[in-house]
């Protein structure tokens, strides 16, 4: 097999750009579950007024939605933000699952946390810098 066959081609990176809207939708659904289930009252560090919680999530969703065209066009700064956001969502999803496991009961956001993990990991993996194929010296 030729090592060049293993190289990541630029068109493969475009698949990652198409995962970003899925992560935004997953975050919106997750925020909705958080609100309906009362996350703003149960978060162990601070308690938020429900109105502030909703405004925070609407603002975040609008910001993430505004980035979709730039991510889709492959703007380097937007791809870096998308990669950063993928990491944030992986940590967010993992946090909800870990708190539920420690409390050994449902914790707000648990049902949609796997969406954040899947979309975050897929987006982060797809936006990695392509690995260059290594030219192998023919053995003599």
Image (cartoon, rainbow, N blue to C red):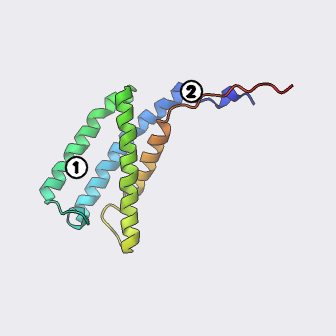
Q: Would you say 97 lies left or right of 128 here?
A: left
Badge 1 crowding class, 10 Å Cα cut-off, few under 14, some 14 to 19, many 20 or more, is some
Query: Secondary structure under badge 2?
Result: loop
Between 69 and 92, the one nearer to me in the picture: 92
Residue 69 occupies which quadrant of the picture?
top left
Number of numbered discs overlaid on the protein picture: 2
Determine the CA span between mark 1 and mark 2: 36 Å
Q: Are marks 1 and 2 in contact (CB under 8 Å)?
A: no
Residue name at image x 28 percent, y 37 percent: 65
Q: Which residue is mark 2?
A: 9
Q: Position of residue 29 (x, y in %)?
A: 31, 52
Q: Would you say 96 lies left or right of 129 here?
A: left
Q: Position of residue 122 (x, y in %)?
A: 47, 44
Image position of 135 with respect to 95: above or below: above
Residue name at image x 42 percent, y 35 percent: 18
Query: Secondary structure under badge 1?
Result: helix
């Amino acid at each position: 097999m030729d090592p060049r066959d293993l190289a990541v081609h630029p068109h493969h990176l475009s698949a990652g750009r198409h995962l970003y809207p899925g992560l935004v939708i997953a975050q919106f659904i997750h925020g909705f579950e958080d609100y309906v289930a009362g996350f703003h009252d149960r978060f162990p560090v601070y308690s938020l007024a429900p109105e502030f919680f909703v405004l925070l999530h609407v603002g975040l969703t609008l910001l993430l939605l505004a980035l979709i065209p730039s991510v889709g066009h492959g703007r380097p700064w937007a791809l870096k933000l998308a990669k950063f956001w993928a990491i944030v969502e992986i940590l967010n999803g993992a946090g909800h699952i870990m708190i539920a496991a420690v409390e050994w009961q449902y914790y707000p956001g648990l049902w949609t946390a796997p969406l954040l993990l899947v979309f975050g990991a897929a987006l982060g993996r797809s936006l990695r810098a392509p690995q260059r194929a290594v030219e192998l010296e023919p053995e003599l």
